[in-house]
Amino acid sequence: MSDAAESPVAAATPDRPSLTELFRAFIVVSISGFGGALPWARRMIVEQKRWMTTEEFNEAFALAQFLPGPNVVNFSVVFGSRFGGAAGAAVALAGLMGPPLVIVTVLAILYAQFGELEILGRILTGITSAAAGLLIAVAAKMAMPLFAKRWGWPAAVAILAFIGVAIMRWPLPYVFAVLAPVAVALAWFFPAVKIGRPVKP
Amino acid sequence: MNDNPLITLFGYFALLSLFAVGGANAAIPEMHRIAVEAMHWMNDRQFADSFAMAQLSPGPNVIIVTLIGFHVAGFAGAGVATVAMCGPTCLVAFFAARTWDRFKHASWRIAVQAGLVPVSLGLIGASAFVLARAADKTAAAGLVTAATVAVAAFTRINPLWLFAVGGVLGLTGWL
């Protein structure tokens, strides 16, 4: 059971997706998701279907990222269960994992057959450059609510996490283990900065 | 180890999935350690090719475990590795999501949420940065990245078109 319908941002989610819609949406996310499915999940859920607001998406994704395991896989379960219980979770997961399982199995058979994949490597180089750009754009869009308002500790925490992992190249679990409790404590003692809460302009 | 390879595969990936905070890409070094160094399932080149194929295939990058599983034990290996990597963590996510929703208005949950969102955003930014640095070895590749940022941020054009352009440029040796 989800009480999303009672939340103050329900206006942004006019229709609850049916199981079929969920399945289809995650198939599209999956087959579009070269170089990671996050940008496509956000595009589908926030920009196209408007099932969630930016803030709701950020919250759900933060939960998926905080849990162990593949983030987007977790996200499909978190999102699916919110809108359709266990069946919703199963359907979203099946939509997300089905197409790549088939594609990658075909690739594996070809690879076992031919081994050398010089040509795949060259195509991949180009696709990865574009995928990097897409991920940068998504990170910027997701960060908008964080930096658009008054700058406070949330912006500082985001910048520290970025520096720790991207610049210092510290192992991600360590950065997370140090920063997450600090950030939660800050949120507890300085709740005035309402990040992730719906704000009506 | 003389165990059935399916059991070994399952054990390793189920364990890894529960410790893989930060997602599939964060777990890549550990997968390499297991598959290449500890178990000698594949060599370096085969691991790198698997990573490339996982990237090339659409969908979550965690799909690399399917390729490792296939390499070790065919279709059964592919299935076992995928279920092991996704199963336990999906169950955790499912119950965590329900618990999370139940405490929607609890002040501790609001604090945890408000604290985690900026951490999460910083980490996504870091992935983008690391990916861009790994991918863009030439100025032309950097241009493809910059063009994609602009198109994805300011237009509603489907970014798949840019992926196609990037793929063709890569294939023809421009990048």
Image: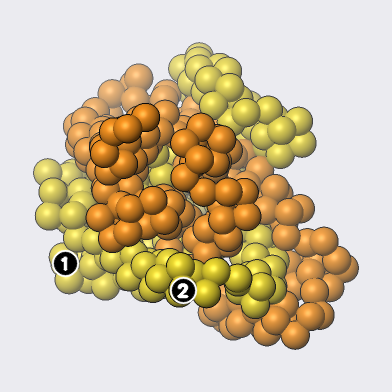
Mark 2 Cα-neighbour bin, 10 Å: few <14, some 14–19, many ≥20: few
Q: Is residue B12 visible?
A: yes
Residue at 33%, 53% (x, y): give it. B73
> On what subunit does the disc labeled 2 rest?
A
- Identify the element where label 2 is drawn: helix
Q: Do labels 2 and 1 share a chain?
A: yes
Q: Colour in which chain A is shown?
A: yellow
Is A93 in front, or is A78? A93
Residue at 65%, 65% (x, y): give it. A128
Is B143 rendered above or below residue B107? below
Residue kind at label 2, given as amino acid type: Gln
> On what subunit does the disc labeled 1 rest?
A
- Which picture quadrant has residue B135? bottom right
- Which picture quadrant has residue A104? bottom left
In the picture of the structure, the residue carrying the numbered disc 2 is A113
Is B52 in front, or is A55? B52
In the picture of the structure, the residue carrying the numbered disc 1 is A18
**Residue B155: x percent and y percent?**
61, 77
- Identify the element where label 1 is drawn: loop
Is A2 rendered above or below residue A106? above
Looking at the image, the residue that sits furthest to the front is B2
Q: Which chain: orange?
A: B
Q: Quadrant of the N terminus of chain A?
A: top left
- Which picture quadrant has residue A170? top right
**Residue B174: x percent and y percent?**
81, 80
Mark 1 Cα-neighbour bin, 10 Å: few <14, some 14–19, many ≥20: few
